[in-house]
Amino acid sequence: MKIRDYRADDADALVAVFQSAVLEGSAPHYTPEQRAAWAARISQGSVLHDRLKDQTCLVASDDNGTLGFVALQANGHLDMLFVRPDQRRNGTADALHDALLSRAAADGHAGLSVYASHLARRFLARRGWQYVRTETVNLHGVTLEHHYMTLQPGHPA
C-alpha cells in the first residue's frame, strides 16, 4: 500500500470509495434512507474535488486501485476518512489516520476535531479521540446522528 497526496485526477475514484463506504460499509449502522441521503451529498468527482482542493488529503492505493482517503481542513477538522468496505480491518484506515496525524503535527495543528459516524466513532476512540457530544443532522429530509470528537496534541495515537 502506498499513501500519497491527493491529485485532482483522483476525484472520481474517491467518489467510488465514498459511495461504497457509505452505502455498503455503513449498512449495519444506518438505515437505507439514511445511507442514501448521506451518499447523495457527494456523487460527482467535481463536487468532491471542490471540497478537497483546499484540504490536506491523503490517498491510499495499491496495484489494484484506490483503497481509501482521508482529508483535513485547514482549521484541524477531520473532514473525511473513508475506505472501501473490503479494506476494513486490514490496516488501511489505520495507515491513513496515522499519516494524517503526522502531517497535522508537522503543519502545527494544536488539536483536531471531527464529526464522526457511528462506525468512525469506535475507530477513532480506539486511537485516543475523545467523545464530546452526539448531534442530529438533517440531510435531504432524513435525520441521522454524528458524534463530535477531539484529539489533543501530544496524544500517542
Image (cartoon, rainbow, N blue to C red):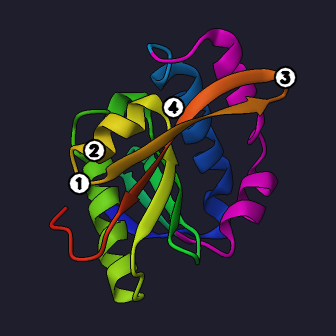
Q: Residues within 10 Å of mark 4 (few under 14, many from 20)?
A: many
Instruction: Determine which residue is flagged by label 2.
Output: 125
Say if mark 1 contacts mark 2, CB within 8 Å. Answer: yes
Q: Residues within 10 Å of mark 1 (few under 14, many from 20)?
A: some
Q: Identity of the amino acid at label 2?
A: Ala
Instruction: Determine which residue is flagged by label 3.
Output: 141
Mark nearer the N terminus (2 vs 3):
2
Q: Identity of the amino acid at label 1?
A: Gly
Give the spatial CA distance, label 4 vs label 3: 21 Å
Give the spatial CA distance, label 2 vs label 4: 19 Å
Q: Residue at 61%, 59% (x, y): give it.
A: 10
Q: Identity of the amino acid at label 3?
A: Gly
Q: Nearer the viewer, residue 21 or 61?
A: 21
Q: Residue at 72%, 61% (x, y): give it.
A: 51
Mark nearer the N terminus (4 vs 3):
4
Question: Residue 128: which numbered mark, if any?
Answer: 1
Where in the figure is residue 142, as x and y percent of width and height? Answer: 77, 20
Q: Nearer the viewer, mark 2 or mark 4?
A: 2
Instruction: Determine which residue is flagged by label 4.
Output: 21
Mark nearer the N terminus (2 vs 4):
4
Tell me the SS state at disc 1: loop
Mark nearer the N terminus (3 vs 1):
1
- The answer to whether residue 10 is above or below residue 53 is above
Tell me the SS state at disc 4: helix
